[in-house]
Amino acid sequence: MSDSNSNSAPHQVEECRGVLFVFSDGSIRRLPKPSFNVPVHDDGSVLWKDVQFDPPHDLSLRLYKPAASPTSTNKLPIFFYIHGGGFCIGSRSWPNCQNYCFRLASELQAVIIAPDYRLAPENRLPAAIEDGCTAVKWLQAQAVAEVPDTWLTDVADFSKVFISGDSAGGNIAHNLAVKLGAGSPELAPVHVKGYVLLAPFFGGTVRSKSEAEGPKDAFLNLDLIDRFWRLSIPIGDTMDHPLVNPFGPRSRSLEEVKFDPILVVVGGSDLLKDRAEDYAKKLKAWGNKIEYVEFEGQQHGFFTIYPISQPSNQLMRIINKFIAEISD
């Protein structure tokens, strides 16, 4: 007797933010733009361009710098901004990401590097982490190039690099911090001075209190968190995968790792709050320079969803202060 479903058309089994659709036969459809319509605010005060940094995987990054260039004796710090999206969606070219990078370049007076990375489920972890490593290695190659890209090298201070990530990008930034170690010796002459983890996307098989009791209508709710992990963790593995849970049963002990200074930022109403706070407390107790800032009542991604708001303005001041304090 034949299976009546064997000839049926593939049906949708997963959907993320109206952008990514996964079907029962394993096929995937992606839309090139986000489902929300946000205008790009390009007033000419920040210059930008795209550069391919990983030809084998056709990955590019977007560079930004203030239009008013600094003097040769007063070059600008470099600030990576690695986008979020649960490892499954997002891009350097999305309007919310571009607008935030405009603001970072202008208000931090820095060169911003916004790399893309391979997305799941087509490319499950550790692909995204590997691509983050490739992006910082690309920067090292620029620093020592015989024929450098002067658009970048004329203004960038390779001895003052900060690696920042939002959500999944915050997870990538953490894993880079572990891999590179304090002082990032393998990147010389590039020197990473510190990290900014914005609501880092960590997980675990045991629910945190904020995950279990957080608002069901949260921008990043528990169903979506689980869906992102289901699509991005290697098939057959769990949320205690070492790249997902920094303190999981199979994770490397971070007690012996020496970290550069880290700023951890999270919204008080973000379901990821408890994991971010636990991360900051543990690393600080182990002797690292960690600053933890919680924005009361704010949701996941508040600074890119509402970039022109009092909390977003305050966050920009906090990042600026963090950079200034550890730049010397």
Image: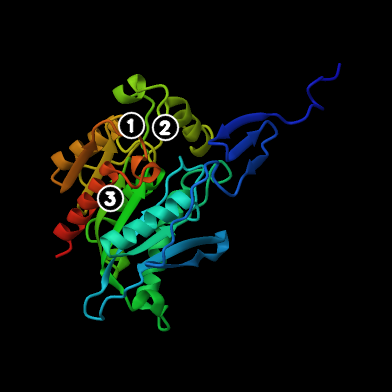
**Mark 1, residues whose alpha carbon is within 10 Å: few (<14), some, or many (≥20)?**
many
Whether residue 218 is visible, yes or no, is: yes
> Label 1 sits on what residue type?
Asp
Q: Nearer the viewer, mark 1 or mark 3?
A: 1
Q: Secondary structure at mark 3?
A: strand
Residue corresponding to mark 1: 270
Up the image or down, 234 lies above or below 322; here it is above
Horizontally, is 268 left or right of 168 in the view?
A: left
Label 1: element kind? loop
Percent of width and height locating residue 278: 23, 33
The residue singled out by tag 3 in the image is 196
The chosen color scheme is rainbow
User: Residue 194 at x, y = what percent?
Assistant: 24, 56
Between residues 10 and 244, which one lies in front from this camera angle? Answer: 10
- Residue drawn at the location 32% of the way across and 40% of the way down: 199
Q: Quadrant of the C terminus?
A: bottom left
Q: Is residue 253 something that shows in the picture?
A: no
Q: Which residue is mark 2?
A: 220
Mark 2–mark 3 Cα distance, whole angstroms, equals 20 Å
Vertical placement of residue 265 versus 317, above or below = above
Instruction: Name the residue rendered at 50%, 55% in the picture.
Output: 93
State which tag comes first along the sequence, 2 or 1: 2
Q: Residue at x 57, y 37 (%)?
A: 18
Residue ID at (22%, 80%): 73
Task: Name the kind of residue labelled 3 in the image.
Answer: Val
Count of picture labels? 3
> Mark 2–mark 1 contact, CB under 8 Å?
yes
Residue kind at label 2, given as amino acid type:
Leu
